[in-house]
Amino acid sequence: MIHAMVDIETFGVRPGYAIRSIAALQFDLDGRKGREFYANISLASCEERGLLVDPATLRWWAEQSEGARAKLEINQRPLLDVLAEFNVWWDQVGVQKIWGQGAAFDPVLIEAAMEKCSLRPHWKFWNVRDTRTTYELAELDTRDVKRAGIHHHGTDDCAYQVDCVAEAVRRLKRRGDGGFGNKFDSLTMGSFF
Ligand SMILES: [Mg+2]
């Protein structure tokens, strides 16, 4: 299983904002799940490295569930340690493709934080993947996919996003010769996934 779904919680939605947690889940495109990574990060350690807090995101957090917020308070660790550990996890598990929810979110913000810590991501830039593009190509409304767990708890978000990607891939394969059809299945799927 060479894929890793990554879900971060943050204090802002652009590169350069503080990261609160990193969750990752190894998976394959049939929806099978493998090894997990999870760590919370202290805000002080992000600020020491020059990462910022967006007041709009702070206000957004105040409206999220008690459960999601409580999970982020447990065992917060320094940014540098967590990012270095995530690279070690990456190598040990042997994943290659990093998936985020949105082309401009999870991997991009992690890479910006790594740069502040003088670290480099252990994935290749051409191996970054995005769930939302996949959902759109498959015309998948993710609300049709059953989810469990806490919204905005990284571990639960990763599991749900893996289920959604697997459903999207099933739909794309099932499409037959309608739309991009078999051509998409044999050519594009083969090289992209
Ligand atoms: Mg999340």
Image (cartoon, grey):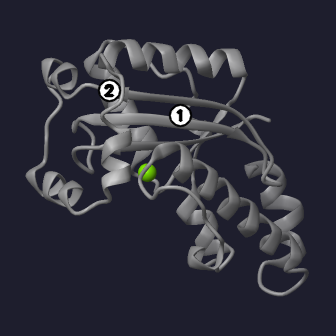
Task: Mark 2 or mark 1: name the one nearer the start of the chain.
Answer: 2
Quadrant position of residue 172: bottom right
How far apart are the alpha carbons under marks 2 and 1? 24 Å
Question: Which of the numbered marks, if any, corresponds to residue 125?
Answer: 1
Q: Which mark is residue 41?
A: 2
Please provide percent x and percent y for residue 116: 25, 20
At which x and y percent is residue 187? 84, 60
Residue type at the position of mark 2: Ile
Judge left or right: residue 53 versus residue 86: left
In the displayed structure, would residue 160 be above or below residue 35?
Answer: below
Establish if 150 lies above or below 36: below
- Closer to the observer: label 2 or label 1? 2
Q: Residue visible at 51% across and 30% down?
A: 38
Up the image or down, 121 lies above or below 190; here it is above
Residue 62: percent from the left, percent from the top?
18, 57
Tell me which corner region of the image, top left, top right, bottom left or bottom right, holds residue 75: top left
Percent x, y for residue 170? 82, 68
Comparing 30 with 130, the one in front is 30
**Residue occupying the point 90% across, 73% down:** 182
